[in-house]
Amino acid sequence: MGITKSEHFTDEQNELATLAKAIGHPARIAIIQHLIKVNSCVCGDIVNELPLAQPTVSQHLKELKNAGLIKGNFEGNAICYCLNEEGFNKIKGFFQHINAYLENKKNQCC
């Protein structure tokens, strides 16, 4: 496997790549969709929704949290997760930029 050479890219490019990588797994998409549906929940609730073992779900939650897409707070001995608006705003801004380009281009590409 090659070296990514991330130091050759801007902080914004590296951050967007981290966010994209975090949502690049179907289990993580399912976790995000579940959090949207219930607004917040504890890890055990998420484990019951997915066909994955608890340690696997915990690893996916860790990846989402490290990327800044979810937040987690302790409630007693459990962690309550919710979406982190700031992370999704960065993704939204990137796709809005692409959308504006595509609308202006009007299919004038090869």
Image (tube, rainbow, N blue to C red):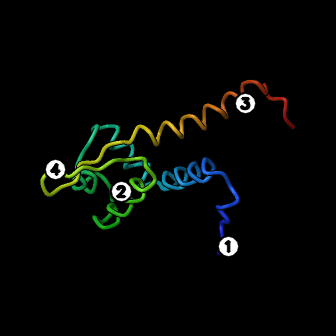
For the C terminus, give its image quadrant: top right
Labels 4 and 3: the sequence-earlier one = 4
**What is the spatial separation of the Cα atoms under label 1 and label 3, in whole angstroms?**
32 Å
Labels 1 and 4: the sequence-earlier one = 1
The disc at residue 75 is 4
User: What residue type is disc 1 on?
Assistant: Gly
Q: Residues within 10 Å of mark 1 (few under 14, many from 20)?
A: few
Labels 2 and 3: the sequence-earlier one = 2
User: What residue type is disc 4 on?
Assistant: Glu
**What is the spatial separation of the Cα atoms under label 1 and label 4, in whole angstroms?**
41 Å
**What is the spatial separation of the Cα atoms under label 2 and label 1, in whole angstroms?**
26 Å
- Identify the residue position indicated by label 2 in the image: 61
Q: Are marks 2 and 3 in contact (CB under 8 Å)?
A: no
Q: How many marks?
A: 4
33 vs 93, left or right, is left
- Identify the residue position indicated by label 3 in the image: 101
In the image, residue 100 above or below residue 66: above
The disc at residue 56 is none
User: What residue type is disc 3 on?
Assistant: Tyr
Q: Residues within 10 Å of mark 3 (few under 14, many from 20)?
A: few
Labels 2 and 1: the sequence-earlier one = 1
The disc at residue 2 is 1
